[in-house]
Amino acid sequence: MLTSSINRIALTGTLLTIVSIASGCSSIDRLSQIGEQPKLSEIENPTTKPGYKPVQMPMPKPETVSYNANSLWRNGSRSFFKDQRAHQIGDLLTVTVNITDQANFANETQRSRIVTEDSGITAFLGSNLLTGKTALPGRLLTADANSSSDGKGSIQRQETLQTNIAAVVTQLLPNGNLVVEGKQEVRVNFEKRELIVAGIVRPEDIQSDNTIDSSKIAQARIAYGGHGQITDVQEPRYGQQVMDVLLPF
């Protein structure tokens, strides 16, 4: 028991040391930025970032493109003139992020059960006539059971996000769909806001003005947030975060 307690103390001390070192490095970085605005990240090629993986999706069999003699029309074409909408790697398109989600769930379950068992023998093969007494006085078995449960749960969520962001085509899938990714950073005083959008776009869903609604993006990944002085004040301190993880109560 004592050995287990010592091991727990040692493990806790090790975790606190690791967190202290990590938070120390972060604190040094934050101390070096006192009085300065958050720095904007450099524009980078998303395909060269560490951990980037090309998107692979189920693709149909390729079809042979047919051309009609003495005709200006080609199968798959959307216009006689050049289409200005994004269709190849490096092209840009505008993503209209319009998220208005609202969910309300309320569940309640009640259960109740009452069971009573009572059995006994007052006379056995006329033994009470011979002896004048019952063969087995009293009750053989008496059992009572009572159980009940009551469970309630509710969820209420409401989210609204409306903004626009320009994205770049990073990959062209074999079936013609486009993989897009866009990142936007806006700095206001000492607070930096970040917006990231990524997903798969069908060329037919791109509007004539080269825009697409976020609801038409498959496998959409949308992140909205930021950091700065206001965010630092809203976050709990490192020590409080560590204690929230380690304390069992």
Image (spheres, rainbow, N blue to C red):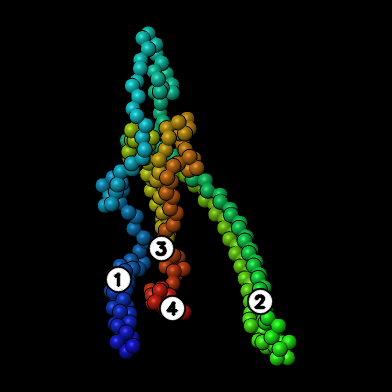
In the image, residue 169 lies at what x, y percent?
A: 35, 38
What is the crowding at mark 1: few (fewer than 14 residues within 10 Å), some, or many (at least 20)? few
User: If you read the primary sequence from the N terminus, does the residue marked by circle 3 or circle 1 appear first?
Assistant: 1
Compare residues 218 and 208 and report the one nearer the observer: 218
Residues marked 4 and 3 touching at CB (< 8 Å): no
For label 4, the SS is loop
At horizontal 60% and vertical 58% (from top left) the residue drawn is 105
For label 1, the SS is helix
**Residue 81 visible somewhere in the drawing:** no
Q: Hey, what amino acid is under mark 4?
A: Pro
Residue tagged by mark 1?
A: 22
What is the crowding at mark 3: few (fewer than 14 residues within 10 Å), some, or many (at least 20)? some
Q: Hey, what amino acid is under mark 1?
A: Ala
Q: Is residue 123 above or below residue 210?
A: below
Seen as rendered, the residue at the extreme front is: 130
In the image, residue 122 lies at what x, y percent?
A: 70, 83
Residue tagged by mark 4?
A: 248
Residues marked 1 and 4 touching at CB (< 8 Å): no
Label drawn at residue 228:
3
Residue tagged by mark 2?
A: 117
At horizontal 33% and vertical 82% (from top left) the residue drawn is 8
Q: Hey, what amino acid is under mark 2?
A: Glu
Compare residues 163 and 124 and report the one nearer the observer: 124
In the image, residue 229 lies at what x, y percent?
A: 42, 66
Q: CA distance from mark 4 to mark 2?
A: 43 Å
Image quadrant containing the N terminus: bottom left
Q: CA distance from mark 1 to mark 4?
A: 23 Å
Q: Is residue 215 left or right of residue 43?
A: right
Q: Is residue 196 above or below residue 202?
A: below
